[in-house]
């Protein structure tokens, strides 16, 4: 083999191992996307770098290598005020934001930032659509985004206010606030006024079909319905979020995860009128860590299997969470008649304070006006659930409730070091149907 060819071969082997290595990195959301301190740095004692330097003329430079070699395109900043946003909280700034997004998304910079200064922006529904030209888009929100509270502004798409769609390597961050101004929707909710028809209200902030997404340090409040939703996305890191709405605001889930894989939610405080975090079908490798929750309905997997749907969720970890004054602590809920499974679920290092149902599996979940029919012929199978280091107090006598399906009993339920008492310090109880629990360490209460 000619020397040159050997050289190319060597080069190729390194590229292949590098790509393999990068893919492994991608699998760990911890490591994912620290784009500020380049993830491409390889410490191999200089071999790799010298190899690149030695072969500047090689035509083998893959796209990955272009990145390794460093930026050649400019860093671009797009400010919404330069596109006509008034930022006075009164003027409708929707068009300015749309224009600014179009400019940002179509810029081919090494990195592009769309900046929202520290002012108040009144916005109707906006869809920020990709794909974008740049490999890194940052939306830096320093100001306040306020939702129009005129329902007729939402006629085109009644279920979204701000939506990012089809964008890769997107970061949305800043210490700004996203305010859904939800009061009008709460008043018109069938949960508040039973005479009204049940209609969906907009989700304040939706990410759909995004890959390599970071959402950081935002405050999201008073959503029309769900505050923050991750949908059909992969490799997501959400952290430092503060999500708040009144305790009696209907259906105002904090963070909703649907059909999303490899997502990490961390260091966030959530206090709303519905679930703090809800994880539903198609979600896999979901980790929620260092979460403060309450008031609200707790951390929920499901509901799953509504209207006979097939649902799958797996590999979910919730750890280091404090729940206070919530209706539920950690809950898995499925409707009767669904199919599929919820499996490999770990709840660990969780503290409960005055939680009504600290540990609950509810396979007879029913959240509709008419009572649900008994449909025991099928169910979403619940399998391999670990409750580890869960302690604190229950607001109700029954702190552990396993209400599993008769035909598809819960399998592989393990409780390890669980200690739940009543607020008074008295013993609480467990209520168990169609389940066999394995106990490790000290566990109270246990199934009768
Ligand atoms: C939960 O509360 C404990 C004290 O009871 C505290 O040490 C811990 O940092 C809290 N965790 C979170 C995520 O707030
Ligand atoms: C505990 O929760 C119950 C029901 O949610 C509530 O009525 C009660 O005031 C709470 N107690 C404390 C000490 O917070």
Image (cartoon, rainbow, N blue to C red):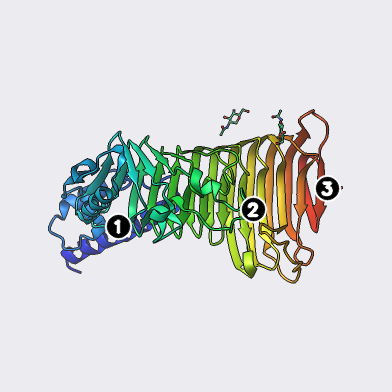
State whether residue 347 is above or below residue 342. Answer: above
Q: How far apart are marks 2 and 3 (CA)?
A: 37 Å
The answer to whether 95 is drawn above or below residue 243 in the figure is below
Q: Mark 1 points at which residue?
A: 14
Check disc 2 and report its element: helix, strand or loop.
loop
Q: Is mark 1 on a helix, strand or loop?
A: helix
Q: Mark 3 points at which residue?
A: 447
Q: Is residue 120 left or right of residue 192?
A: left
The mark nearer the N terminus, 2 or 3, is 2
- Left or right side of 141 for 282: right
Label disc, if present, on residue 194 of the rendered structure:
2
Residue 228 vs residue 392, the one in the foreground: 228
Q: Which of 28 and 317 is in front in this view?
A: 317
How packed mark 1 is, by other alpha carbons closer than 10 Å (few <14, some 14-19, many 20 or more), is: some
Residue 252 visible to the viewer? no
Query: Comparing marks 1 and 3, which lies closer to the viewer?
Result: 3
Q: Residue furthest right?
A: 448
Which of pointers 1 and 3 lies earlier in the amino acid sequence? 1
- Residue in front for this viewpoint, 20 or 337: 337
């Amino acid at each position: 083999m000619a020397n040159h060819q050997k050289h190319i071969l060597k080069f190729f082997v390194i590229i292949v191992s590098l790509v393999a290595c990068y893919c492994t990195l991608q699998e760990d959301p911890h490591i994912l996307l620290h784009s500020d301190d380049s993830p491409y740095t390889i410490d191999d004692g200089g071999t790799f770098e010298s190899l690149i330097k030695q072969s500047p003329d090689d035509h083998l430079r893959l796209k990955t290598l272009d990145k390794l070699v460093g930026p050649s395109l400019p860093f671009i900043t797009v400010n919404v005020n330069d596109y006509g946003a008034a930022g006075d909280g009164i003027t409708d700034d929707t068009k300015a934001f749309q224009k600014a997004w179009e400019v940002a998304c179509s810029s081919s910079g090494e990195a592009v930032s769309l900046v929202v200064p520290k002012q108040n922006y009144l916005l109707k529904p906006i869809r920020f659509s990709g794909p974008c030209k740049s490999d890194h888009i940052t939306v830096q929100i320093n100001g306040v985004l306020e939702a129009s509270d005129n329902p007729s502004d939402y006629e085109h798409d009644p279920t979204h206010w701000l939506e990012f769609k089809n964008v890769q390597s997107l970061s949305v961050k800043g210490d700004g606030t996203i305010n859904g101004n939800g009061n009008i929707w709460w008043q018109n909710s069938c949960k508040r006024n039973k005479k009204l028809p049940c209609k969906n209200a907009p989700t304040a902030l939706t990410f759909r079909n995004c890959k390599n997404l970071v959402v950081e340090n935002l405050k999201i409040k008073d959503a029309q319905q769900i505050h923050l939703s991750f949908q059909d996305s992969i490799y997501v890191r959400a952290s430092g979020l503060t999500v708040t709405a009144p305790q009696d605001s209907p259906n105002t889930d904090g963070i909703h995860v649907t059909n999303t894989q490899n997502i990490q939610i961390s260091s966030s405080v959530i206090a709303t009128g519905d679930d703090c975090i809800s994880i539903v079908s198609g979600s896999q490798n979901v980790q929620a860590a260092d979460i403060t929750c309450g008031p609200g309905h707790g951390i929920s997997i499901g509901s799953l299997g509504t209207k006979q749907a097939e649902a799958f969720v797996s590999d979910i970890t919730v750890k280091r969470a404090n729940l206070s004054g919530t209706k539920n602590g950690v809950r898995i809920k499925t409707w009767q008649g669904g199919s599929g499974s919820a499996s490999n679920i770990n709840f660990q290092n969780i503290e409960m304070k005055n939680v009504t149902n600290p540990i609950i599996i509810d396979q007879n979940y029913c959240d509709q006006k008419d009572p649900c029919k008994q449909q025991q012929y099928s169910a979403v199978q619940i399998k391999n659930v670990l409750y580890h280091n869960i302690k604190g107090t229950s607001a109700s006598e029954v702190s552990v409730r396993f209400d599993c399906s008769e035909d598809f009993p819960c399998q592989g339920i393990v409780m390890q070091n669980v200690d739940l008492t009543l607020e008074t310090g008295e013993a609480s109880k467990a209520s168990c149907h169609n389940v066999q629990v394995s106990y490790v360490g000290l566990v109270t209460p246990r199934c009768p």
